[in-house]
Amino acid sequence: MADVLPVSVTVILPTRNEEEALGPTIDAIPRDWCESLEIMIVDGNSSDRTREIALEKGIRVHLEPRKGYGRAYRTGFDVAKGDIIVTMDADCTYPAEEIPDLVRKLVDEDLQFITCDRLKLAEEGSMSGLHNFGNWMLSFTARMLFFYGVKDSQSGMWVFKKSIFDNKKMRPTNDGMPLSEEIKILARKHLGKKKAIEVSVPYRPRVGDAEIHTWGDGWKNLRFLFFKRVGLHRTRTTWGALESNPDSMNGNLPEQGK
Ligand SMILES: Nc1nc2c(ncn2[C@@H]2O[C@H](COP(=O)(O)OP(=O)(O)O)[C@@H](O)[C@H]2O)c(=O)[nH]1
Ligand SMILES: [Mg+2]
């Protein structure tokens, strides 16, 4: 085995009712390749067994009752203990086995931010025709509006140094799905093309049902891009976790379904 990387890493998985896919997603994350590895879910009040499964697997559970994919990350980024953060959906679509190599690349090449492009290596059945088209439309629009050159604006796998958020301008503001395109726009803008890069990774069919509303989310993403371009996007909630958010580290997590 290659040397253990002298870094601390947190893998954040946002979850909302992912009881089917969460177990295999956690199991696919390689262990013992870095000095310290924290794996956590930021759970959006799942009503199925999601949190129970995470606890059974021995990973950290942070409960963020406020709704939204972006909200989960804006909380998770704040409470993560690692110096390097890795993000993925908890639905078996992203290649967890690539995490060590991606982190090694970040460190060896002295990068700040890596976003993982899914389009080039997408496996059959991973994206429906409509999602593929929507994704292309959004990525094309983002490239036109921001000239930032990222191919896959909607990818949810990023590997980056937590310290990028020391610069408050780097903190994404959107609580929904548009956080995904927002973080890439910010990274390219504030960190530059040399330190914020895109690499291609495989993308696989989802396990379990998605809650994404194709038309509604697509429209919100598109609207966000235009508002952001003219500086009219706004944030409704503040950066970071609420003090009242339960966390398995603090032993105040309520039992699931209670
Ligand atoms: N905490 C939290 N997680 C969410 C929420 N909505 C979606 N997720 C999770 O975010 C990830 C991305 O959602 P997904 O349905 O896979 O969207 P898609 O990949 O764009 O089709 C999944 O792991 C979901 O379980 C939410 O409101 N709160
Ligand atoms: Mg997904």
Image (cartoon, helix red, strand yellow):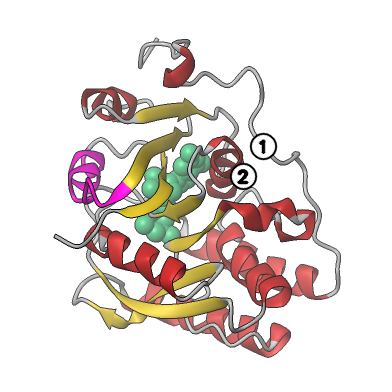
Instruction: Residue 135: give x, y in percent of width and height.
Output: 47, 76
Q: Which residues are magenta?
A: 20-34
Q: Residue at x 26, y 65 (%)?
A: 98
Quarter of the C terminus within the rendering: top left
Determine if the magenta segment contains residue 25.
yes
Any atom of ligand 1 within 8 Å of the CB at mark 1? Answer: no
Q: Residue at x 57, y 44 (%)?
A: 77
Instruction: Residue 174: give x, y in percent of width and height.
Output: 68, 53
In which quarter of the view is residue 76 placed?
A: top right
* Mark 1 residue type: Gly
What residue would you read off at disc 1? 240
Determine if the magenta segment contains residue 183.
no
Q: Residue at x 68, y 53 (%)?
A: 165
Instruction: Residue 146: give x, y in percent of width and height.
Output: 71, 83
Quarter of the N terminus within the rendering: bottom left
Q: Quadrant of ligand 2?
A: bottom left
Circle 1 crowding by C-alpha within 10 Å: few under 14, some 14–19, many from 20:
some
What residue would you read off at disc 2? 74
The answer to which of 47 and 253 lies nearer the viewer is 253
The answer to which of 114 and 33 lies nearer the viewer is 33
Q: Is residue 198 left or right of residue 184?
A: left
* Mark 2 residue type: Arg
Any atom of ligand 1 within 8 Å of the CB at mark 2? Answer: no
Q: Are marks 1 and 2 in contact (CB under 8 Å)?
A: yes
Q: CA distance from mark 1 to mark 2?
A: 6 Å
Task: Using the image, determine if residue 54 lies above or below residue 179.
Answer: above
Q: Is residue 164 left or right of residue 209?
A: right
Q: Residue at x 38, y 55 (%)?
A: 88
Q: Is label 1 in a helix, a strand or a loop?
A: loop
